[in-house]
Image: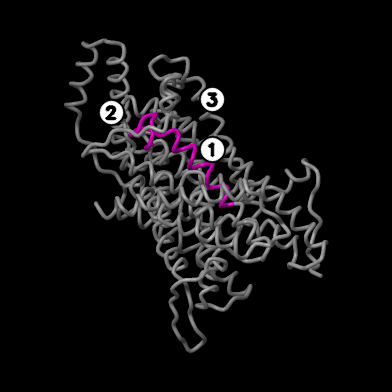
Amino acid sequence: MNNEVKAPPNTIPSIVRNIGPGLILAGSIVGSGELIATTKTGAEAHFDFLWLIILGCIVKVFAQIELGRYVITHNKTSLSALNSLPGPRLKLATKGGKIEANWILLFWSVMLLTILAQQGGIAGGVGQAMAITFPLSEEGSQRNQLVTEKVSLTLQLSEAEKSGNLNQANLVRQKLESFPDLPESKDDIFWAIILATLTIALLLNGKFSFIEKFCIFLVSSFTLITIINLIALQTHDAWAVRTEDLIAGLSFSFPSVSAEKNPIITALATFGIIGVGASELLVYPYWCMEKGYARFTGSREPGDQWLVRAKGWLRVMRWDAWGAMFVYTFCTIAFYLLGASVLGRTGLVPAGSEMIQTLSSMYAPVFGEWARSIFLLGAIAVLFSTFFVALAGQGRMAIDALMVSGIIQKNEKNRSMCLKITAALFPILSVSCYAFFPKPVVLILISGTMQALMLPLIGFAVLYFRYRESDARLGHSVIWDFFLWLSFLSFLAIGCYQAYAQILS
């Protein structure tokens, strides 16, 4: 009998005390998926894709729980489970043994590179926010002032047009047309490097409990401010979300597409990373294992004792997953509505080195002059949380991939050493991506595209585990299977459209 087995909690308060992995996921989701990708989708598609945003948050949780069920039941990591699936395999003989990886593991390896680039975009977002708050050069100060004026003029133009004040609108439009070029500044890159240094220090010393508490604090603080902002926005006629906007957003409609703008591509890339993206689907079981769910359940046995423990800890995991889903879905809807109501109506689209300044305009109608300060503090908090948590999770997965494929020997000593290496290497690689390609939104959406392509593979894996590897004693309902298949079909549709779009482009 495993000495670490533990009876599962059987009351709601005790279950709540044992959740945590899902909240860590929320910490890694809100930054890139919600704050940046979702608001950009709202800016481009207006309210039309509200239904797709909600679907993207809810439909993935079924695959998340089923994958978690398999990992806890069999005490396997996500990548070890994926590498056991049938299909083409890469096999290489070496002096120390053999390297073997199947097609899904190889695709994940490519996706990992885009995730590191995505985190570069996140680091760039923090760098921009810090450069605005604490500019390091005269050029940086001048650039901040000019970008702020430009965004403010754009908001004034939109308000003047909506109020029918044509003289004011023409005056503001003339100012925008004669607006000076922005000076070059590297302040954001310098701050991103400082961020990477701090992240390395935290990753080298951070334990699971610290990561858990750190994320909960940062994400909950900014989410509360965002929800207050959205509610207060309803008192402003020009920016309020109207009933007809919500009806249009939930009517399964599609926005118009032009040569300059294709919100469908943006939305589908966003679908790959909002809620539980492909990356989070795979990293979630690792946090469940570190929390102890699989360890407390113990090795699978034919007796009733194991079955009682398994059902109990799987129940905790379901509470954790559904609770997190409620949190990030609520956050995602709030950010999307903000993007559609403010950015969509003004024509502002977050991009390049002006991304953070543009996003801060969502808070200007309510908070006025305080908007930028409030947004900057919140953006720094959630983006840093995302950067830290995502690299912590990807470091664990990268090491597991090396062990699963046989590149390095699987033992605790190697794992501990490699965790330190990835803790230093991954932040450096991510920031380097931003330094050489300072377009954070593009970096994030590239990763979103790869994750959207990965979703059908995860959906296939989940169905395989359900019908070929699941323990029948744990039970599956017809309704649950229906939603598993719905999850897979939505993944397949998104992945196929993304592949089609990439071929055409």
Q: Position of residue 427 (x, y in %)?
A: 45, 58
Q: Residue at x 62, y 56 (%)?
A: 68
Identify the amino acid type marked 1. Answer: Thr
Tell whether 485 sits left or right of 291.
Answer: left
Residue at x 47% of width, y 74% of height: 101
Residue 247, by quadrant, is: top left
Q: Residue 392, image x and y in percent?
A: 54, 57
Instruction: Give the residue at mark 2.
Output: 150
Asked whether disc 1 touches disc 3, contact meaning CB atoms under 8 Å apart, the reply is no
In the image, taking residue 218 as reference, residue 424 lies left or right, namely left
Q: Position of residue 373 (x, y in %)?
A: 45, 30
| Residue for badge 3 | 228
| Mark before the other along the chain sequence, 1 or 2 | 2
Location of residue 475 with respect to 40 vertically, above or below: below
Mark 3 to mark 2: distance in Å? 26 Å
Q: Nearer the viewer, residue 181 or 313?
A: 313
Q: Which residue is mark 1?
A: 329
Q: Which mark is residue 52?
A: none
Dot 1 falls on a residue whose secondary structure is helix
Range of magenta residues: 40-64
Q: CA distance from mark 1 to mark 3?
A: 16 Å
Tell me which amino acid carries mark 2: Lys
Amino acid at the residue labelled 3: Ile
Looking at the image, is 84 positioned above or below residue 34? below
**Which mark's residue is nearer the viewer, 1 or 2?**
1
Ranked by sequence position, the earlier of labels 3 and 2 is 2
Numbered disc total:
3
